[in-house]
Image (cartoon, rainbow, N blue to C red):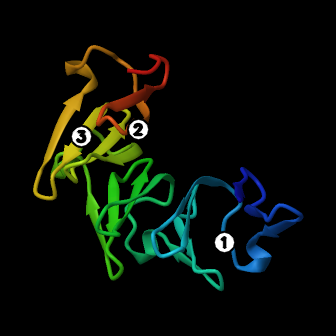
Amino acid sequence: FWIGTTSGGVILYNGFSLRHFTEEQGFSSKWVTSILEDSKGNLWFGTFGDGAISYDGEQFVRFSEKEGLSDNMVEALFEDRHGDIWIGTERGGACRWNGNSLTRYTAGEGLADNSVQSISEDSTGKLWFGTRKGISSYDSEEFRSYTVAGLPWRYPVSSMLLDSSGDLWIGTNGGGVL
């Protein structure tokens, strides 16, 4: 399994030994915030300051502001049912990688806030984004947002999970789980 660190890149533990990946091995970040394995077996690493990094088992590819990412501080990674990779950022909303290009989605397009902390998908294919100011749903055409001011809690959303019954669990920063 993979271990993300706050000062030493990523570590792969195979059950017997540790293999450390740092800048010397081609991994361009020291601080890892999130890890995702996509349906093709590629690994994705969200970093604090260096964007998102994909790894196909042989080489690392960086997606940063230079390559069109909206913000280099990545908070969340998610793969939707179509195989698109969603990247939630600290200040730049969310970006979707469709395998060819990045598309940005921000508060200007309807997100509750540009700080996307978590991403989930429900059984209908609707995406859910947890932000510091509430949650947003996206049906591939438009966003609908539920801000903290209009909800029964006043805390930033830090994590979300859609369970097997279809219930959306929302973890907040300071307000518990809803």
Residue at 41%, 38% in the rendered image: 161
Residue 3: percent from left, percent from top: 72, 55
Instruction: Work out whether 10 lies above or below 117.
Output: below
- Residue marked by disc 2: 161
Question: Residue 28: which numbered mark, if any?
Answer: 1
Answer with mark 1 or mark 2, whichever residue precedes in sequence: 1
Q: Which residue lies furthest to the front in this view?
A: 165
- Residue marked by disc 3: 136
Find numbered disc 2 in the image and state the secondary structure of the residue it sits on.
strand
Viewer-side label of 1, 2: 2
The answer to which quarter of the image holds residue 159 is top left
Residue 110: percent from left, percent from top: 17, 46
Instruction: Work out whether 89 lies above or below 52.
Output: above
Classify residue 130 as left or right of residue 150. Answer: right
The answer to which quarter of the image holds residue 55 is bottom right
Find numbered disc 1 in the image and state the secondary structure of the residue it sits on.
loop
Q: Dividing the image into 4 quarters, which one contains the N terminus?
A: bottom right
* CA–CA distance in space, label 1 to label 3: 31 Å
Answer with mark 1 or mark 3, whichever residue precedes in sequence: 1
Dot 1: few (<14), some (14–19), or many (≥20) neighbours within 10 Å? some
